[in-house]
Image (cartoon, helix red, strand yellow):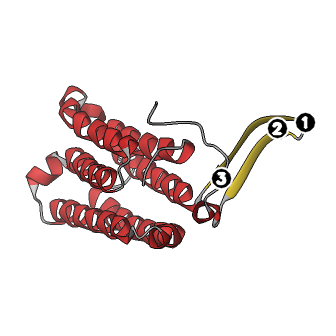
Amino acid sequence: MSIFQLKQSLADPVDLHGVIKIQLGQPKHVLISTYLTRLDQALIAWGMVTAIIFLIAQSYLLDWPTQAVVWSALSCVAIAVSGKLTWFWVTTRNQRWIFYGWSMLVIAGLGLTNGGIFGGWGFILRHLCALWLGISALGYLMTGIGIKAPALIAIGLVHACTIPSLTLLPQHQFLLTGAVMSVSLWLLAAFHWEHT
């Protein structure tokens, strides 16, 4: 059995809460028919946030101090939005630790990133992409093991295995990191994956 599957009909009332149904095509010829749970919506939002952050970092459109302030604010907004979207899910399933754990990881990452930028911590600055891939890997592995989700464990391993490959593309580290992080989030939103 594959760790990612096409979405099936929703039966769990927890997943029905706040669902968005999507149908593309004409009523008689529907091309795509799917849905986005509130968890899916939070994953898509975080995918967009990480794509924006790492694409702009790759293109050097903003100086580092400006990026640090803007990305910290955007990340805090994303934490609040994802909390609002997922609170019912994590509360009903008695899994609030997931939200708190990921929030603490992001806040710790922001603290280290901002320390690197404003404090001139060269080691952190040289390894920002590895830092964020490592934080994400830790979060996925923690969550995957905690809720017995093979897809999350696999994505955590992909993040961890991407870290050594950053040296192969030194000029495109932010692009690679953003792609791995964003695509992973969007895959989780688009497909069904088993969990407890």
Residue displayed at 45% across by 65% down: 78
Question: Where does residue 140 sit, x and y in percent of width and height?
Answer: 32, 50
Q: Is 133 positioned to the left or the right of 10 in the image?
A: left
Q: Is 137 positioned to the left or the right of 98 in the image?
A: left
Question: Where does residue 180 sit, x and y in percent of width and height?
Answer: 37, 39
Residue with the mark numbered 1: 28
**Circles 1, 3 touching at the beta carbon (< 8 Å):** no
Tag 3 or tag 1, which sits nearer the N-term?
3
Q: Helix, strand or loop at disc 2? A: strand
Residue with the mark numbered 2: 25
Question: Where does residue 7 sit, x and y in percent of width and height?
Answer: 61, 42
Crowding at dot 3, Cα within 10 Å, few <14 / some 14-19 / many 20+, comes out as few
Which amino acid, by three-letter code, is at mark 2? Gly
**Which of 88 and 43 lies nearest the eye of the viewer?**
88
Tag 2 or tag 3, which sits nearer the N-term?
3
Residue with the mark numbered 3: 10
**Which of 45 and 67 lies nearest the eye of the viewer?**
45
**Which of 142 and 110 lies nearest the eye of the viewer?**
142
Crowding at dot 1, Cα within 10 Å, few <14 / some 14-19 / many 20+, comes out as few
Q: Is residue 41 above or below residue 159?
A: below
Question: Where does residue 76 sit, x and y in percent of width and height?
Answer: 39, 70
Q: Helix, strand or loop at disc 1? A: loop
* For discs 1 and 2, the disc positioned in front in the rendered view: 1
Q: Helix, strand or loop at disc 3? A: loop
Residue displayed at 21% across by 44% down: 130
Q: CA distance from mark 1 to mark 2?
A: 8 Å
Q: CA distance from mark 3 to mark 2?
A: 21 Å
Which amino acid, by three-letter code, is at mark 1? Lys
Crowding at dot 2, Cα within 10 Å, few <14 / some 14-19 / many 20+, comes out as few
- The quarter of the image holding the C terminus is bottom left
Q: Is 182 positioned to the left or the right of 38 in the image?
A: left
Which amino acid, by three-letter code, is at mark 3? Leu
